[in-house]
């Protein structure tokens, strides 16, 4: 990973930079570069690249909602790394709502995204909201959809336990 991933990210971007703005390979190159920067602790550099990638996706491929949601998720991860957790939560909620609308509440991607929302709520010390979201919405669906001993269900149980344990009102 590391330096090689970054070199490949820059190479992908340079390879397709000369193509028209609406060229999907150019957009893919930008996405690869943004993710490489992010995963190599260069989030401040990654954010404008990821935002530009999202803007291109919205402008030229607005009908490809899945790619737009992936781009938004990458930006949310970047915002988390930069300490902009409230901004990240807004994006995560938006992605979750769109996945509920398009894939349904019981789809594994939707549950995973809900897990990310719940983690952010806990990180921001919104314990009651996190507890209610996990207990009343995510956990029952996860147990039914992926099973009670699936890693995702167990992670939700862990988040629920953390919200109960760290909430000063419940100690």
Image (cartoon, grey):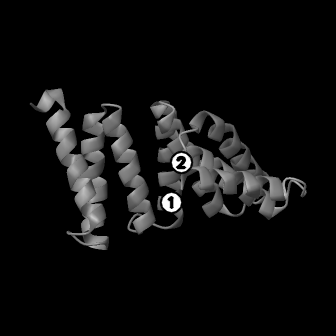
Instruction: Point out the image quarter for the C terminus.
Output: top left
Q: Looking at this view, is 43 or 156 the one in front?
A: 43
Q: Residue at x 20, y 69 (%)?
A: 149
Quadrant containing the N terminus is bottom right
Q: Is residue 29 above or below residue 167?
A: below
Q: Residues within 10 Å of mark 1 (few under 14, many from 20)?
A: many
User: Residue 122: x and y, percent?
Assistant: 31, 38
Of all residues, the one furthest to the left in this rendering is: 171
Question: Tag 2, which secondary structure?
Answer: helix
Gap between marks 2 and 1 measured at Cα: 24 Å
- The answer to which quarter of the image holds residue 146 is bottom left
Q: Nearer the viewer, mark 2 or mark 1?
A: 2
- Choose the circle earlier in sequence order: 2 or 1: 2
Q: Report which quarter residue 107 is drawn in.
A: bottom left
Q: Can residue 35 be spotted in the picture?
A: no
Q: Secondary structure at mark 1?
A: helix
Which residue is label 2 attached to? 39
Asked whether residue 13 is in view, the answer is yes
Q: Quick check: 16 left or right of 109?
A: right
Q: Please provide percent x and percent y for residue 154.
A: 23, 60
Across and down, in percent, residue 120 comes to: 38, 40
Q: Total number of numbered labels?
A: 2
Q: Residue at x 21, y 54 (%)?
A: 157
Find out whether the residues at labels 2 and 1 contact each other: C-beta distance under 8 Å: no
Q: As drawn, is 170 to the left or to the right of 78? A: left
**Residue identifier under label 1:** 99
């Amino acid at each position: 990973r590391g330096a090689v991933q970054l070199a490949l990210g820059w190479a992908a971007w340079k390879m397709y930079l000369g193509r028209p703005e609406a060229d999907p390979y150019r957009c893919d190159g930008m996405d690869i570069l943004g993710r490489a920067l992010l995963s190599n602790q260069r989030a401040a550099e990654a954010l404008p690249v990821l935002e530009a990638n999202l803007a291109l996706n919205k402008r030229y491929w607005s009908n490809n909602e899945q790619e737009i949601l992936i781009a938004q998720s990458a930006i949310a991860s970047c915002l988390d790394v930069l300490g902009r957790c409230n901004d990240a939560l807004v994006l995560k909620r938006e992605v979750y709502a769109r996945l509920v609308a398009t894939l349904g509440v019981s789809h594994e991607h939707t549950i995973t995204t809900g897990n990310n929302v719940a983690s952010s709520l806990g990180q921001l010390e919104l314990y009651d909201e996190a507890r209610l979201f996990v207990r009343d919405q995510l956990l029952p669906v996860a147990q039914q959809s992926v099973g009670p001993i699936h890693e995702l269900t167990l992670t939700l149980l862990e988040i629920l336990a953390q919200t109960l344990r760290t909430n000063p009102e419940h100690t």
